[in-house]
Amino acid sequence: MSDPQPGRRGPVVVDTGVFAAELLRRGAPLAASYRSLLEGRPFIVSFATVAEIRFGAELASWGVPRLQRLEQRLARARIVWPGPELVAVYTDLRTTCVRNGHALGQKEHEADRWVAATALWLHVPLVAHDRIFKNAPGLELLTRLDAE
């Protein structure tokens, strides 16, 4: 779904792919397509997004300038770390997804579940370019996937 209320500028949780797009040369078109959804909004990232991006940066041996851009981007975001309440939402989400046969319940989507649980816990939309989040129970998804 696209942004159902384009004038609404409340906070959003941003998934790893969209968050990292500005940092990747090949991500420029993706970053541009999500700019209108993110502009003027406070953005939140899950600890899982931080871990995924830092792992990818280390594995790819990013240089100092790109690592500095990453840290500057992270500094502008609110990072949500796990605690008992988030764990409870994660547990409910995974249980529901497994019982309903939603792919988000599968083991390989661990980081995606934490990202989705963060949005659910905070009661804010998730901005993502990943079909795994479509029709996730209770999740408000803002995406440009349908525009492709």
Image (spheres, rainbow, N blue to C red):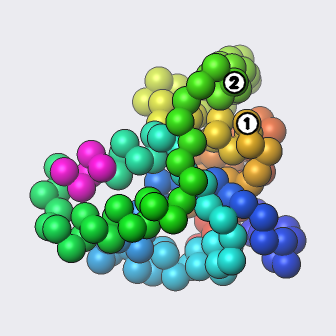
Among numbered discs 1 and 2, the one appearing first in the sequence? 2
Residues drawn in magenta: 54-58
Q: Is 73 positioned to the left or the right of 138 in the image? A: left
In x, y percent, where is residue 59? 17, 49
Kindly indicate whether the residue at mark 2 contacts the one at mark 1 (C-beta within 8 angstroms).
Answer: yes
Q: Quadrant of the N terminus?
A: bottom right
In x, y percent, where is residue 61? 13, 58
In the image, which disc is placed on residue 85? 2
In x, y percent, where is residue 55? 27, 45
Q: Amino acid at mark 1?
A: Trp
- Name the residue nearer the viewer: 80 or 3: 80
Relative to residue 15, is residue 93 depicted above or below? above
Residue shown at 53%/48% (left/top)?
A: 79
Provide the residue designation for mark 1.
121
Mark 2: secondary structure: helix
Mark 1: secondary structure: helix
